[in-house]
Image: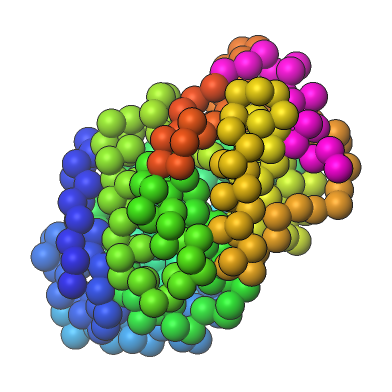
Amino acid sequence: MNQITVHTSRPYNILIGNGLLKDIGRYVKEVSGCHKVAVITDDIVAGLYLQTVTDSLRQADLRVCSYVFPNGEASKCHRTLLPIYDFLIREQLTRSDLIVALGGGVVGDLAGFAAATYLRGIDFVQVPTTFLAQIDSSVGGKTGVDTDGGKNLVGAFHQPILVLCDLDTLSTLPEENFKDGVGEAIKCGMIRDAKLFEVMRSGQVREHLPYVVSTCIDIKRKVVESDELDKGERMLLNFGHTVGHAIENHMHYQLTHGKCVGIGMAVITKAAAAAGIGDPSIHDAVVQALQNNGMPVSLDIDYSDACEACLHDKKRSSNILKCILIRSIGDGYIYAMPAENFKPFVLKGVEK
């Protein structure tokens, strides 16, 4: 087992290894004096892991209740959140109790936001069961819900007290879901680690899974520690995301997050090259990495329309929009431009 400590305003450990779920009760007892645990998960993950988790928690003399909601990005909204509050109230959870977020990014974001806001904040543990959630959304304390206006526009920073990454859960992921994590792992390599990028470009991700998961988490740890509240360097983690989120919104979330981010990386690197502020070889490298992992590199949509969503992006400040560009593989940076220039800039990245 590998352990990484995140030194934020409230430090916590991330445990990475195989077979961790069956011991979650012991790990929770080590970090919390709680007496009751509410496990929040979706209907797919519940069928796979809920029994194992609840059994372990009960064996640790903890009282356990659980809430299961329909899987999918469409559930990451207030219509799912409000019944979760009702459930927590009905189960009489107190500030000394605990929420366990068991599942992928939707579960983590939604349960984390419930933890951040119920009783003005209670502790929670992240138990990510997807590749994407393990290397990205479970680390760093971002929680939230989607609205009709865009993705993650309503949320809160609320650090977990523990993150438990059981690599065995990745063996049950359908290949298409696994690819969502591939997109984020390529991103990590592009912004901070050329060696990681080469592993991702090889297309041999599963053969190096412990290394990839641990390296991606450590990259995010360093960035989060230097900018916990996402006002500076942490924006680097959004490489490919400004365009990617716009695509997700335009597609009504029918194309999953990691694939949209991958296309976003391809678009933004081509746009930078067309504008003379990026090396064309960077775009070629991103495309090769995506293709070697069976990921899409383009999408036939109206990008002019999709780019309107970028004007509501969280990285916009007044009339300035900050996007992430790449000087060289492993070296990302923040590039600010007037918001009105962003659409024509992006459109250069989709020209035939």
Camera-side residue of 281 and 305: 281
Residue 181 seen from this side:
no
Quadrant holding the C terminus:
top right
The x and y percentages for residue 80 are 60, 59
Please say whether residue 180 is visible from this viewpoint: yes
Quadrant the N terminus occupies: bottom left
To which quarter of the image does residue 213 belong? bottom left
- Residue 324 lies, in percent from the top left, at 54, 32
User: Residue 21 location, x and y as percent?
Assistant: 29, 79
Which residue range is magenta in the image? 336-352
Identify the residue at horizontal 45%, vertical 42% (top origin). Answer: 329
- On the picture, is 349 further left or further right than 203? right
Question: Is residue 209 or residue 93 the one in the foreground?
Answer: 209
Depicted 321 relative to depicted 56: above or below: above
| Horizontal side, residue 66 vs residue 177: left or right | left
- Residue in the picture at 28% in, 31% down: 226
Q: In percent of the image, x 11 and y 65: which residue is there?
A: 30
- Asked if the stretch drawn in magenta spans residue 345, the answer is yes
Task: Judge from the rendering whether residue 298 lies leftward or rightward of residue 53; answer left or right.
Answer: right
Coloring applied to the structure: rainbow
Q: Considering depth in this image, is 294 or 133 the residue closer to the camera?
A: 294
Q: Position of residue 320 (x, y in %)?
A: 62, 15
Query: Total marks drawn?
Result: 0
The residue positioned 67% from the left and 13% from the top of the image is 338
Q: Which of 314 and 52 is in front in this view?
A: 314
The answer to whether residue 32 is magenta is no
In the image, residue 314 sits, relative to residue 89, either above or below, namely above
